[in-house]
Image (cartoon, rainbow, N blue to C red):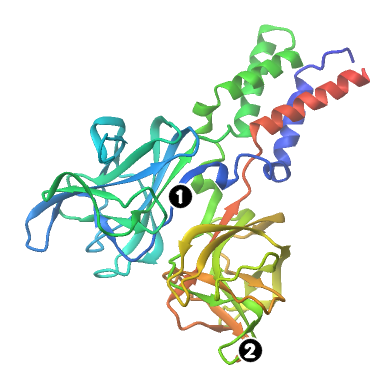
Amino acid sequence: MGPDMVIRNPLFIAVMITAFAPRLATAGPGDMDDLIVVDQPPLNTGGAASDTEFENIFGQSVSQRVADDFVLSSTAPISHVTWWGYYELDNPPANETFRLRFYEARPGDGLPDEDNIVFEQILDTPNRTATGRRIFAGEDPREFQYLAELSSQVLLNEQTTYWLEILQIGDLSTSFSWEVSLASGNSNFAFNNVNAPNWATTSINANVAFQLSVVPEPRASVLVILIVGIATLRRKRGGHMRLRNAMITCVLVMTISPPIALAGPGDLDDLIVFDRQPSRVGGGASDTLFRDMFGQSVFQRVADDVRFDSAVALGQLRWWGFYDQDNPPAQETFRIRFYGARSGDGLPDESQIVFEQTVDTPDRSATGETVFVGVDPDEYVYKVDFTSPITLAADAPYWLEIIQIGDIDTFFRWEFSGGAAPISLAVNNSASNGWFESVLDADNAFQLIAVPEPAASSLLMAIIGLAAFRRRRS
């Protein structure tokens, strides 16, 4: 073969790379830290009305707008907004309209500047999903998660204060409340109503719950399809398109990646396939060796049930927890297990261990929040990449166990998440004879993240590398 490899071979390579996506994906754009640039998780204890038209306790039609401030550490193109909320009377409408705005901060008091609206979008019935949790307020309404893909990227500058406003508009029959969050912010959230028509900061020590996400890299499948299409076109016109042209095409595709990326693997719903957010009100011991209140050495294992609507390949796990005496060790070991459910009571089946991984000192980060129990210990989020993708079947019961092992000096507790569906936690401890169902109406806080498709940049570099290798051989 001559010094130039025709496009047929790069196409074959591209298909093979796509087939081996799980291996490449670990270095791809799917890492959630690369996508979520602002993260204020919900605290299911209440919220603030953010609605242009609802009835107050006296039956009068009133309105209230809510906005929360944030600052980015680096300039970012925002593509998606996720938020959490509920309806005061637990009556979600079939159809609804939201308005989303980004404001700059006005000089002086730094509150939302109505004269500087950076971006506005009207959302007709945005993506809304019941999380399975309840809000511990009023009638214990259901919690919902909302996701909006912005009509265009919103480029926000680093080290600049912005305000995000989200409110339901024009529906008197429902009262939407934006759920609170204890995430640290520049200040508490702001509100605008009949008593504060020019914005004011709430006296409540809280923010509201939302995430801002950036545009990821384009998915590899889009890149492959574009190369195939261009190659086919060139064949119809006569002759072969050679590798150097294909490489130019790849570079051009990557240059215009933001529009293509809207369909890419970074969409959060495509990556987080199971999401239970921390409640910061406590957690159960999940530790093979700790001391009880009498100084005796005991153990307790905790598992939480999971089920998926469709088969998934998991690549990463995150969970939230704390240490009873607020004494995180410099080094520690965790064991992660997925169990099948045993027949009869449906609790974890020790004879059906689907996957096990022991992790020495996993990635652990302080969230900046505290857990309201005992000594008010610091909250931590943990992250683990699985050694290999874990394939779990659709509509099958599984149990996830996360446990600290072999450290009597610390007492690890896996943090609670509100609500329980369909079963509460499973517990196995020194006082029991195997697994039993907890009497607490709660689950534990964790996220399961699917394996994304390979990054387009990885695909391009693989094609270039193989082409160079072929040239050297020829």
The residue to which callout 2 is attached is 430
**Whether residue 300 is situated above or below residue 269 in the rendered picture:** below
Q: Residue furthest top?
A: 238
Q: Residues within 10 Å of mark 2 (few under 14, many from 20)?
A: few
Which residue is at 6% across, 56% downward? 60
Which of pointers 1 and 2 lies earlier in the amino acid sequence? 1
Query: For residue 280, what is the image quadrant?
Result: bottom left
The residue to which callout 1 is attached is 39
Q: Amino acid at mark 1?
A: Asp
Give the numbered dot on residue 355: none
Can residue 86 be seen here? The reply is yes
Mark 1 and mark 2: Cα distance apart in space: 38 Å
**Whether residue 409 is situated above or below residue 271 in the rendered picture:** below
Relative to 354, 439 lies left or right: left
Which residue is at 41% across, 70% downward? 419
Residue 356 placed where, x, y %?
72, 66
